[in-house]
Amino acid sequence: MEKIVSPALQIEELRRTLREHEYRYYVLSSPTIGDLEYDALMKRLEELELQYPEWDSPDSPTHRVGSDKTEGFVSVQHERPMLSLGNTYNYDEVGDFYRRVADGLGGYPFEIVAELKFDGLSISLIYEDGALVRAVTRGDGITGDDVTANVRTIRSIPLRLRGENYPRLLEVRGEILLPFKEFERINSEREAAGEPPFANPRNAASGTIKQLDPRIVASRNLDAYFYYIYSDELLPATHYDRLNAAREWGFKISDAVTLCSTREEVYAFIDHFDTERLNLPVATDGIVLKVNSLAQQEELGFTAKSPRWAISYKYQAERARTRLRYVSYQVGRTGAITPVANLDPVLISGTVVRRASLHNADFIA
Ligand code: IVH
């Protein structure tokens, strides 16, 4: 005999199951059920929510697809300003950072967390009681755009946190990215439709997050990595442990994050990822070094623009010199004309480049 389960319980159970499978698929990249099975569960949940709208909830997995509501973006003030980082470009400058930190801490020992610097657009997420309530772009660092509806469509971002021991009020900061594969797929679609291609995955990601229709955002398979958390409630005492806690709550934290106790370990990290980062599915343009202890971060404080406890190291962008043979003009389906540079073939980051779009000033420069 079939047990009679209340619709509310069925809905809750389906949501729990779907969240678990989303986490395994999008965050851990190791699914345990097939697409068809997943779709069937999602369909069942959609049906129940339609039938019992009183049990609908904004953090249900069904809301990933994006509603057709178009809302302009509301400007929101950040709880804490979103600062930028000082840049370094060589080992000497990294050494200077090390000395400044050591001096600032009066010679006390310290550890450094080395991370990849993701090249997308920064985002601040606010969670209340474990539910995503707001997502705001960096903007000018003081106020940004509320892009919550769009961010809800990103499947590696938890709408509801895992486990129980997260703070009631939590802010998580990270980077939204368009994976290279998606970038190529979208650009070939755009070119086929006679639309200008995106210049790079970063432009494509920010263009996408500013779309007014969340369904377009949902179709573009954005991804997100997180690198800093804030709460006024009790959190682990080190940045490294906080990132591990955030990983437990369901956020995508890069496996590259490494705790270093010596300057040599930091240099080894930089060296390793100079080439290794080219095998990643998303764009990175450097690394970020952060003092591990939060007490030490506080002691070091900030300059007007950036923290004294962190710095970025920028990798040299790969460049090549070649000859411009001639400029041709490509006519798209809509009649848009794009100038194209035809070059002597040249090898950059593993691909042979023969043609380059000249559709915007950045490209031409
Ligand atoms: S930490 C207060 N960590 O780089 C310091 N930033 O100029 C907060 N970024 O716009 C930043 N990867 O969006 C940090 N692992 C990482 C990062 C990272 C990329 C971006 C960030 C910010 C810029 C800093």
Image: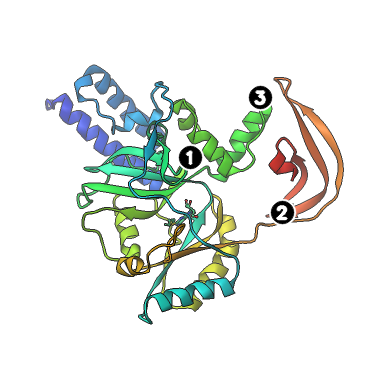
Label 1 environment density (alpha carbons within 10 Å; few <14, some 14–19, many ≥20): many
Q: Nearer the viewer, residue 51 or 54?
A: 54
Mark closer to the chain start, 3 or 2: 3
Q: Eyeballing the image, is 330 above or below 85? A: above
In the picture, the disc for residue 222 is 1
- Residue underneath mark 3: 193
Gap in angstroms between the C-alphas marked 1 and 2: 25 Å
Residue found 83% across the figure and 34% down from its top: 328
The kind of residue on which mark 1 rests is Leu
- Residue 289 in sight here: no
Residue 203 seen anywhere in this rendered image of the structure: yes
Question: Would you call the spot at circle 3 few (<14 residues within 10 Å), some (14-19), or many (20 or more)?
Answer: some
Q: How is the image coloured?
A: rainbow
Q: CA distance from mark 1 to mark 3?
A: 21 Å
Q: CA distance from mark 3 to mark 2?
A: 27 Å
Q: From the viewer's perspective, is 46 left or right of 98?
A: left
Q: Residue at x 81, y 49 (%)?
A: 345
**What's the residue type where badge 2 is placed?**
Ile
Neighbour class for label 2 at 10 Å: few (<14), some, many (≥20)? few
Based on the displayed image, in which of its 4 quarters is residue 9 positioned? Answer: top left
**Looking at the rendered structure, which numbered label has been put on residue 171?**
none
Locate residue 129, reporting x and y percent: 21, 42
Q: Secondary structure at mark 3?
A: loop
The residue under label 3 is which amino acid type? Ala
Could you say which is closer to the camera, residue 102 or residue 320?
102
Answer above or below: position of 191 versus 78.
above
Residue position marked by numbered label 2 in the rendering:
348
